[in-house]
Image: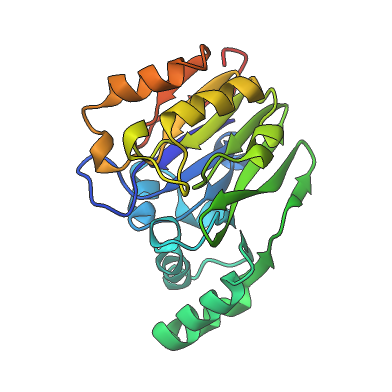
Amino acid sequence: MKIILLGTGTTFPHRFRNASGLIIQINEQIDAQFLLFDCGNGILRQIERAYINFMQIKDIFISHLHADHVNDLPVLLKANLMRKNPGIIRIYGPSSIRKKLEIWLTEIYPYLDIVLNQLEIQEITGGLLIENPGWQVQCIPVRHGVIEAYGFKFIAGKTVVYSGDTGFCEELIQAAKNVDILIHECSYPTPLGSEDHTTPLELGQIAQQANVRKLVLTHFYPICSGRERELLGDIRKNFNGKIVFGRDLLTIKLDKSI
């Protein structure tokens, strides 16, 4: 199993960081399954750059409906239609995702309305989403201003939590207790933080309280560029564990060496 960070940036354009998205790959080669978490603008291209066949992605988890987390979803669905990819695509997301997809696929892109017949859409509120032999996915309500937002927890021997976009969140701390990897947003340097996003200082507190084995940083606004030492220093004030600065197409293997 492995994690591929497809996009570690935000809405703002950045030469080296795509908008949000990541893959968790289960198994290898013929038996591989690809779980897509968020699908911001440009993610379909990132999937290709990661040498993943987009037609093998059958489970898509959307943390919230901001553009940098969802804009490539209709593009991905169109690509499947054009390639005549059979089978159901399962989409999990906030309570308005069904309505938004129906508008996208019947009003904005009416030539894609047939895609609705291929979709299973599950509006999420928290708790268990999928339980398959050997692995499961849960969702966690998080705090991202007034918008409905979720993080996700993947369990398959190893445990991974992905925060999505969130401010300091006790629910996320509890869900991330003792996890192998916490993939968490790190949007701004601490002096520029807001309630909608977690500051590096708060992130260190979250990782320490949750006792995570490895912290992977993602969702960097351009203002973070060149300030990595500052970000790390603030996290280190509260957390002494392993820290990885995420970058686009970074692959993290879920093995004993975590």
Colour style of the rendered protein structure: rainbow
Q: Is residue 115 left or right of residue 210?
A: left
Residue situated in front as seen by the camera: 242 or 102: 242
Q: Count of labels shown? A: 0
Q: Look at the picture and state if 256 lies above or below 140.
A: above
Whether residue 132 is visible to the viewer of this picture, yes or no, is yes
Residue situated in front as seen by the camera: 172 or 124: 172
Q: Look at the picture and state if 179 lies above or below 29.
A: above
Q: Where residue 186 sits in the image (x, y, percent)?
A: 41, 36
Whether residue 247 is visible to the viewer of this picture, yes or no, is no
Q: For the C terminus, give its image quadrant.
A: top right
Q: Where residue 190 sits in the image (x, y, percent)?
A: 37, 32
Q: Where residue 61 sits in the image (x, y, percent)?
A: 58, 54
- Image quadrant where residue 118 sits: bottom right
Q: Residue at x 47, y 43 (%)?
A: 22
Q: Residue at x 70, y 45 (%)?
A: 137
Q: Look at the picture and state if 69 lies above or below 237.
A: below
Q: For the N terminus, give its image quadrant.
A: top right
- Image quadrant where residue 97 sits: bottom right
- Image quadrant where residue 155 sits: top right
Q: Where residue 214 sits in the image (x, y, percent)?
A: 54, 20
